[in-house]
Image: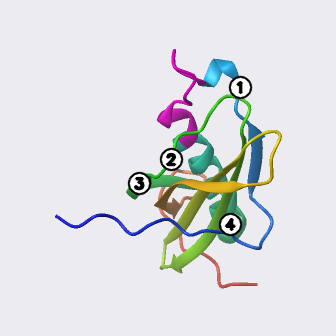
Amino acid sequence: MSAAPPPAATPPTTAPTIRVSAMPADANAYGDIFGGWLMSLMDSAAGLTAARRARGRAVTIAMDGMQFHAPVHVGDEVSVYATIARVGRTSIAIDVESWARDRHGEETRKVTEARFTFVAIDEDRRPREVPPAA
């Protein structure tokens, strides 16, 4: 089994979709942030991106390739970047990266990444076509 490639050294140059500070309530007894908290942020960032592209409601149907590269600690600033990877007839695949920065420093580190897939839905919660790009 080969090791995963090292994470990228620098964060994306675009503005983050979401940026928050990790708080004590988000951590375990050792001061590391729960993976579920980070997954929730990533899903929220992907959801914002999907809803904007779908011009309406879109729901998460899958998350693939989740990898944790480094821990997030209480007080870290967490920036989540979401990029549309593919648009299908009713679905949108979004690549999401999370980066952390120590509260008092400038060095950043990629902490996790995954691909989220959303389906655009109508008022009856049935799949609908994603409109053409504006």
The numbered mark, 1 or 4, whose residue comes first in the sequence reads: 4
**Amino acid at circle 2:** Ala
Q: Are marks 2 and 4 in contact (CB under 8 Å)?
A: no
Q: From the image, tell me which residue sits under label 1.
A: 23
* Cα distance between the residues tagged 4 and 3: 17 Å
Badge 2: few (under 14), some or many (20 or more) residues near its Cα, within 10 Å? Answer: few
The residue carrying mark 3 is 66
Label 3 SS: strand
Tell which of 55 and 72 is nearer to you.
72
- The answer for how far apart the CA atoms under marks 2 and 1 are is 17 Å
Residue 37 in the image: state x and y as whole percent. Answer: 56, 34
Magenta span of residues: 27-38
Tell me the SS state at disc 1: loop
Which is in the foreground here, disc 2 or disc 1?
Answer: 2
Q: Magenta region, mostly helix, strand or loop?
A: loop
The residue type indicated by label 1 comes to: Met
Q: Which numbered disc covers residue 70? A: 2
**N-terminal-most mark, 4 or 3:** 4
Q: Is residue 29 magenta?
A: yes
Along the viewing direction, whichever of 130 and 94 lies nearer the viewer: 94
